Image (cartoon, grey):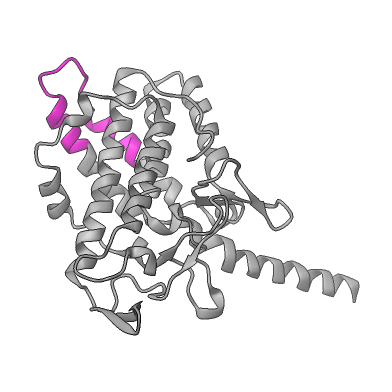
Amino acid sequence: MQRLLSRRGLLALLAFAWCTAGMPARAYDGEQHQQLTFLAAKQFNRCVAGTNVPMLTPLQVRYIARSNVGQAERNLFARMFNWRYYDRGAEAERSMMWAFDTRFHEHFNEVLERLNRADDAAKRYSNLGRIVSYVQVVSSPAHTVPVYTARFWRFSVTDRFDRYSVDEDAVAALIADGCDFLNEPAVDYGALVRAVATETLSAVREPIGGIPASWEVFWEFADQAGNFGEYGPAGNNFGRATQFKCRGDERCVLLKDDPLYAQFARERHLSAVRGTMGAMLLMQLGAGTTELVNAE
């Protein structure tokens, strides 16, 4: 009888871990990470052509993309114990009797250590891909505000922004001839994560074009920076038709596939690509492995 109860308890724990720790840790899926990475590599090589900065070879780009995608599509066991949320406070938090690491900072610093020890190109560029994965993750509001995305009681295990398609042509057009990142490289990889995260946080606080509300109607900040926020009155409905109270008794409306959604997503994906190019520059310059501490 005791063995049966123990087995049932284990199954219950695994089921809970699946609902609460598995899927929501993914942020963008592997295909989106790959799209953002290849967009960045293409623009990076266009910008450094004719300069003293080495261009990325096709093989190096694929090392980066492969490990980036692999990190996004980690197995269930790995995702159970390491979530991909940014910590705006001074310390990374743990939850569930310290079994689950809710913030990614410790793993990020471990990747930097591996990059420092890397003794061949395959290892260096593979670890760069893991770093790039986090640079891209913090362009996602839910993982940067952050808002806990697993609401299994509502059959929801992911944030809808994270599944919004990357419009490659639109993002490429926004990049255009943008090579400013060459003029002022980031201090280190941690600075790149913080810079992209700061842009995301600012964007969430910005007004929704022509509507008397900010994007906080989707992702509300916690009172304390180290805590999780929550979904606002618009709920986890990015990209969908939704309405919400926005000013006095006035109700604001967004439509399915509203152009305002597309514009917001393009800007966040553009930020991810720019941050990725910044990381590629640090690698090609042979710099930038300072730890990511104090996240804000």
Judged left or right of residue 129, residue 6 is right
Whether residue 129 appears in this view of the structure is no
Question: Residue 33, position in %: x, y?
Answer: 33, 49
Which residue does the image show at 38% across and 64% down from the upper left?
Answer: 216
Magenta span: predominant SS is helix
Nearest the eye: 267 or 6: 267
61 versus 36 height, above or below: above
- In this view of the protein, which residue sits in the foreground, 228 or 158? 228
Determine whether 117 is above or below 111 in the image.
above
Residue 104 horizontal/vertical position (percent)? 53, 45
Which residue is at a point 51% across and 61% down the rendered structure image?
Answer: 229
The answer to whether one can see residue 162 in this image is yes
The segment highlighted magenta reads 41-65
Residue closer to the observer: 213 or 186: 213
Note whether 158 is above or below 96 in the view shown: below
Q: The N terminus lies in which quarter of the figure?
A: bottom right
Image quadrant in which you'd find residue 258: bottom left
